[in-house]
Image (cartoon, rainbow, N blue to C red):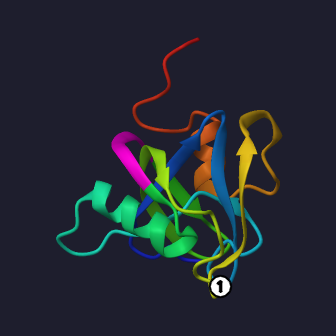
């Protein structure tokens, strides 16, 4: 399958204590996989604003202290999609995690880093495997 022109996605790692907020995707590419809140960067929108908007739209959670983390180059060969994903990170501010967008979210929850649900969305799998720019610093 031929790849479409790359699109820009924004994803956000939201932490609350030692847990991260994840959602199971529905009705969008990658349906059935687990990912963080995120979506397309709108024209003229700052990545931090996009990350906060998507988190609230999808899960009802508001985020503070949003900063840039890295970029992943995500090629979904089976669907012909190519995304450059801007990864942001932020802290939980307020709101109860819930399914706020049932047409694109099947489940939502807080997970320990050592007990993440499977399967993971490609972008998140790439991030966690260190396939990102800049590359992770050695431990």
Q: Is residue 116 left or right of residue 66?
A: right
* Identity of the residue drawn at 60% across and 63% down: 96
Q: Quadrant of residue 41?
A: bottom left
- For the question of whether residue 123 can be seen, the reply is yes
The answer to whether residue 86 of the structure is visible from this angle is no
Q: In this picture, is 135 found above or below 13? A: above
Along the line of sight, the residue nearer the viewer: 48 or 118: 48
For label 1, the crowd category at 10 Å Cα-Cα, with few meaning under 14, some 14 to 19 and many 20 or more, is some
Residue at the image point whose x is 55% and y is 38% from the top: 131
29 in the magenta segment: no
Location of the C terminus (image quadrant): top right
In which quadrant will I find the N terminus? bottom right
**Which of the pair 57/5 is nearer the observer?**
57
> Which secondary structure type mostly characterizes the magenta part of the structure?
strand
In the rendered image, which residue does mark 1 sit on?
102
Q: Which residues are magenta?
A: 63-71
Furthest-top residue in view? 139
Residue at point 53% right, 48% down? 14
Above-or-below relation of 86 to 39? above
Q: Secondary structure at mark 1?
A: loop
Residue 60, percent from left and from top: 53, 69
Image coords of residue 77 (percent x, y): 63, 67
Residue extending furthest left?
A: 44
Query: Is 18 displayed left or right of 114 in the figure?
Result: left
Residue 110 location in percent, x, y?
Answer: 70, 51
Q: How many marks?
A: 1
Nearer-the-camera pick, 74 or 48: 48
Q: Quadrant of residue 47?
A: bottom left
* Residue 26 in picture, x, y percent from top left: 70, 80
């Amino acid at each position: 399958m031929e790849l479409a022109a790359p699109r820009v996605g924004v994803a956000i790692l939201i932490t609350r204590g030692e847990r991260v907020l994840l959602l199971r995707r529905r009705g969008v590419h990658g349906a059935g996989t687990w990912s963080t809140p995120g979506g397309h960067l709108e024209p003229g929108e700052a990545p931090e604003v996009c990350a906060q908007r998507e988190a609230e739209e999808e899960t009802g959670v508001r985020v503070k202290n949003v900063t840039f983390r890295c970029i992943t180059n995500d090629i979904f060969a089976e669907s012909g999609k190519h995304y450059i994903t801007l990864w942001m990170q932020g802290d939980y501010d307020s709101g109860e995690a819930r399914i706020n967008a049932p047409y694109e979210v099947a489940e939502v929850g807080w997970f320990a880093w050592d007990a993440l649900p499977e399967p993971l969305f490609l972008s998140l799998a790439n991030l966690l495997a260190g396939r990102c720019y800049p590359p992770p610093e050695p431990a």
